[in-house]
Image (spheres, rainbow, N blue to C red):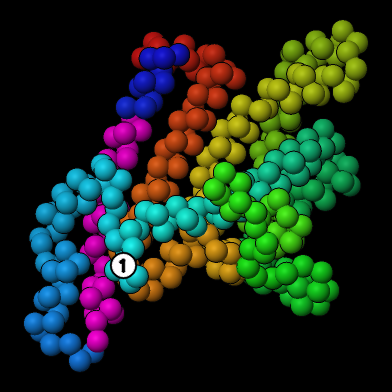
Amino acid sequence: MIIYVARRLAQALLVVFAMTLIVFLGVNVIGSPVDILISPDCNQACYQASLKALGLDLPLHQQYLVFLKNAVTGDLGKSFAIGVPALPLIVERMPATLELALSAMFLAIVIGIPLGMWAGLKPDSVAGKTIMGGSILGFSLPTFWVGLMLIMVFAVYLGVLPSTGRGETVQVFGVRLSILTLDGLAHLILPAVNLALYKISLVIRLTRAGVRETITQDYVKFARARGLKARRVILVHVLKNIMIPVVTVVGLELGNVIAFSVVSETIFSWPGMGKLLIDSLRLLDRPVVVAYLMITVLMFVVINLIVDVLYTALDPRIRLQGAAI
């Protein structure tokens, strides 16, 4: 187990290093932030001075080496627009994004797994067919359109939920949380549902496929032949065995939810990292964009590492295969 985790950790470090190069080059070859930040009346000398002040006068490979050296110490540069360190600026917005992403994944799990189990156990029933039809809608409807419809129905027509902002927050161990207040929960519902809709559909279909495959296995038939109650067969023999792919996909999708919550945060004016990214892209604020992407990469790597460890805990065969390589 230790060798397996060490190997995965080494692979994760290589991925992070490769992504630093890809992210830095990808961001720095697009446009020039100086053209946006300086006054139109600025002459050539002023333009060159601005380039030097931002460190953009160096060749690209030297800029990358400076970035890499500073990144090791946790310095991802200063925002071109407001002149503050980019990393604290991202970290300040991180709790809001994590709160939204975790709430969305919680909804996907508590709604998707039971509905998927029902659709898998009773595929020919009206409820089972309705659930699968609804999952197709969840895959098909664009997130931005669903968000606008949620605002129109629940905020404009019914007036029961707020449409923008994070609401009232409380500070817990230095972190601002809105989920612990009623006003914060009210503000969280619409963006969380909007972000969770696609994931709910994914979990439903994944769970249903796992159930349909598992109930035909010999160990399930043997459990039924022994006279075990249907509830025990489902919860112990079926649910436990379908959790391996579910844990894997949910873990990976958590990274996707964090990274791609930009649309929901923008529609609902949720003050998270995604909204900050959109604002920074408009200004070509490269340090903030790079800091956001690097933090997202680190989240993906850490989540994947945790999923790998959980996978080996659920299925020891993975650990044995890894040791044999």
Residue drawn at the location 74% of the way across and 26% of the way down:
239
Residue drawn at the location 44% of the way across and 68% of the way down:
278
Quadrant where the N terminus is found in the figure: top left
Is 308 on the left-hand or right-hand side of 325?
right
Position of 9 relative to 28 (above/below): above
Residue drawn at the location 39% of the way across and 68% of the way down:
280
- Considering the whole magenta stretch, tell me its main secondary structure: helix
Residue of label 1: 83
Q: Secondary structure at mark 1?
A: loop
Quadrant where the C terminus is found in the figure: top left
Q: In this view of the protein, which residue sits in the foreground, 200 or 106?
A: 106
Position of 181 relative to 231 (above/below): below
Q: Position of residue 222 (x, y in %)?
A: 80, 10
Is 242 on the left-hand or right-hand side of 310?
right
Q: Position of residue 270 (x, y in %)?
A: 58, 64
- Check disc 1 and give the amino acid type: Gly
Q: Quadrant of residue 268?
A: bottom right
Q: Quadrant of residue 263?
A: bottom right
Range covered by the magenta-colored residues? 11-39
Q: Quadrant of residue 310?
A: top right
